[in-house]
Structures are given as C-alpha cells and as structure tokens.
Image: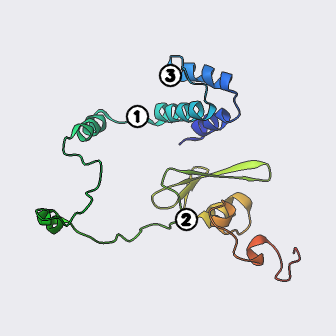
Amino acid sequence: MNETTYQQVQALSRMTVGELRERYIDVFGEETRSHHKDFLRKRIAWRLQALAEGSLSERARRRAEEIANDADLRIRMLRDPIKPGLMEVRERSVSGRLQPQRDSRLPLPGTLLVREFRGRDIVAKVLDKGFEYDGRWFKSLSAVAQEATGSKWNGFLFFGLAEPKGPQDQGEEPDGRNG
C-alpha cells in the first residue's frame, strides 16, 4: 500500500457514520443501506486499495468462478476417511510438514508496520525479503528502526511485534531503576 492510500485509510477511522456514508458514495458511486461503522470503514478501505493497486485480473476472476462452480468441491470433511472403498483416497494422500521460510513474528508481505516516534509516523513495508522504509530497502527491522531513530533498537520491539523479555528490554536497569 502506498503512503497516500495509507493516509486515506487512516482517515476513515476518524470519520462519523454520516461521513463514511458520503465517502462510500464517492468511492463506489452508489448509496449504501448500511449504517454499521466498521463495515463501512472496511469496505471503503478495501475499495481504496483496489483502486490504487488494481483489482484481480480478468484471468484470476475467471479462475475463481471456475473453482466456485466446481461440482466436486467438498464443503465438509469426511467423517471417517478410512471407510472401505476410500483406501484409494488415502493412498493418494501425502502427509508432511512444511518448514516456515520466514520469521513467524512477521506479518505477510505488503503489510505496513507503523510506529509513532517523537511526533512522526515511522512506516515500514514488509517485503518478501526485507523491508522498505523511506523508499529504500533494508535487510532487517532493526536496521529500519536505527535509520528512523538514529539509535540502535530491536526492530521487533520497536514496531510492537515482540513482547519485552525482561527489564533490559524495557529500558530499565536490572535493579528496576530507569537508566
């Protein structure tokens, strides 16, 4: 999400229901029957992002329709997958475990991490490999935090993705005094 879209989405959280209904007309070109603030906010945010970054391609839409119309699509799990006659299904099944490729504390690529620091918003975008801050690529969140603040930080703590483990992580001396 680009900076302009991010600011437009943030502005939605400060709007009243009446303002959201007006914004809905601006974005969708039609009135809404809803008066539910959270629904309107999420729907408008989705539309703003789709307009800024593009919606699904026509090919993706067709494929989604094919999948949705697939008659063999199973909605519920079988109650007992080892019933007689289902052994061929079991023989074709593979079980295993995928190893995670990324740190589990990180959100999905494309997510914006925001932290207010000394009166300004620090916004970093999560990429497949690394992070983007201020139009530049960084290998780690700690590098982003250091660039933004001028001092060394644990990037996960700075952006609120990890809980402090002890007094040292909270900026206190081991005896409990602030340093």
The disc labelled 3 sits on which kind of residue? Phe
Q: What mark, if any, has residue 118 been given in the picture? A: none
* Disc 3 from disc 2: Cα separation: 35 Å
Q: Quadrant of residue 37?
A: top right
The answer to whether residue 60 is left or right of residue 154 is left
Asked if residue 134 is positioned above or below residue 130 in the image, the reply reads: above
Give the mark nearest the N terminus, 1 or 3. 3
The answer to whether residue 142 is left or right of residue 67 is right
Residue sitting nearer the eye, 46 or 118: 46
* Disc 1 from disc 3: Cα separation: 14 Å
Q: Measured from the top left, where is residue 158 in percent x and y?
A: 69, 62
Residue that carries the numbered disc 3 in the rendered image: 28
Q: Which dot, 1 or 3, sits closer to the camera?
A: 3
Asked if residue 6 is positioned above or below residue 34 in the image, the reply reads: below
* Disc 1 from disc 2: Cα separation: 28 Å
Give the mark nearest the N terminus, 1 or 2. 1
Q: Measured from the top left, where is residue 82 in percent x and y?
A: 19, 67
Residue that carries the numbered disc 1 in the rendered image: 55
Circle 1: element type: loop
The disc labelled 1 sits on which kind of residue? Ser
Give the mark nearest the N terminus, 3 or 2. 3
Circle 2: element type: loop
